[in-house]
């Protein structure tokens, strides 16, 4: 059973009426079709322009849930008629996300298509330099892209960084916050 209700700023009391909930299920595999037992799922409830990170079932807080040894997951007791966004990752692999629309969730159960994550085994390395081509030690380097392992690291003392990525396009961004509260 589940319920979700929008509340305006004038509401001070309400009754939530539990109704049959939705169960979202699926599996996570590698590119060869083997289960990825170390995969993790993050799920957001989309409400208008806002998105709320939902804790794993049975937990008060947290951001990810683990799949079982078969790479399977089942998320129960979700309100029907809402939009959900799932983000799937696994160490050493890329990522995938999917949106389940409010129209699709007007049911008791949905089995999602298999999430197949590509292996992240291609090295990508570089160096962060300033306008004078001098290394920027400690710069924050972020990586993301469709199907890629989203991540971030700090450049070493020589401005050097290394990622393992999947085949395909991606975006790399670097920045260094000034010390002492100065401007960029």
Image (cartoon, helix red, strand yellow):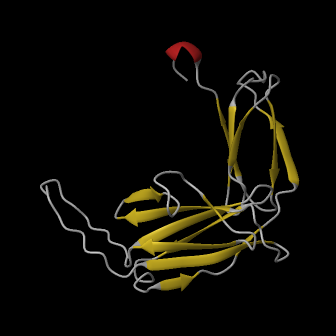
Q: Where's residue 181, x and y in %? A: 50, 16
Residue 50 image-quadrant placement:
bottom left
- At 83% from the left and 24% from the top, the residue drawn is 158
Q: Where's residue 140, x and y in %? A: 67, 33
Q: Where's residue 115, x and y in %? A: 69, 73
Q: Where's residue 96, x and y in %? A: 66, 66
Looking at this view, is 122 or 183 the one in front? 122
- At 25% from the left and 74% from the top, the residue drawn is 17
Position of 77 with respect to 10 (left or right) is right
Looking at this view, is 73 or 130 the one in front? 73
The answer to whether residue 38 is above or below residue 126 is below
Count the marks.
0
Looking at this view, is 183 or 67 the one in front? 67
- At 67% from the left and 57% from the top, the residue drawn is 145
- At 75% from the left and 69% from the top, the residue drawn is 69
Report the residue that reaches farthest toward the front: 58
What quarter of the picture does the N terminus occupy? bottom left
């Amino acid at each position: 059973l589940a319920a979700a209700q929008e509340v305006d700023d004038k509401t001070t009391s309400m009754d939530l009426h539990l109704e049959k909930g939705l169960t979202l299920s699926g599996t996570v595999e590698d590119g060869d079709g083997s289960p990825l037992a170390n995969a993790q799922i993050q799920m957001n409830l989309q409400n208008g322009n806002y998105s709320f990170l939902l804790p794993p079932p049975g937990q008060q807080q947290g951001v990810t849930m683990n799949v079982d040894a078969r790479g399977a997951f089942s998320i129960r007791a979700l309100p029907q008629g809402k939009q959900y966004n799932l983000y799937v990752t696994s160490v050493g692999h890329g990522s995938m996300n999917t949106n389940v629309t409010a129209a699709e969730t007007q049911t008791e159960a949905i089995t999602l298509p298999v999430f197949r994550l590509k292996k992240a085994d291609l090295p990508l390395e570089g160096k962060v330099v300033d306008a004078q081509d001098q290394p920027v030690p400690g710069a924050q380097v972020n990586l993301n892209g469709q199907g890629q392992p989203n991540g971030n690291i700090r450049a070493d003392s020589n401005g050097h960084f290394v990622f393992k990525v999947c085949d395909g396009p991606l975006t790399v961004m670097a920045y260094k916050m000034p010390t002492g509260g100065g401007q960029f």
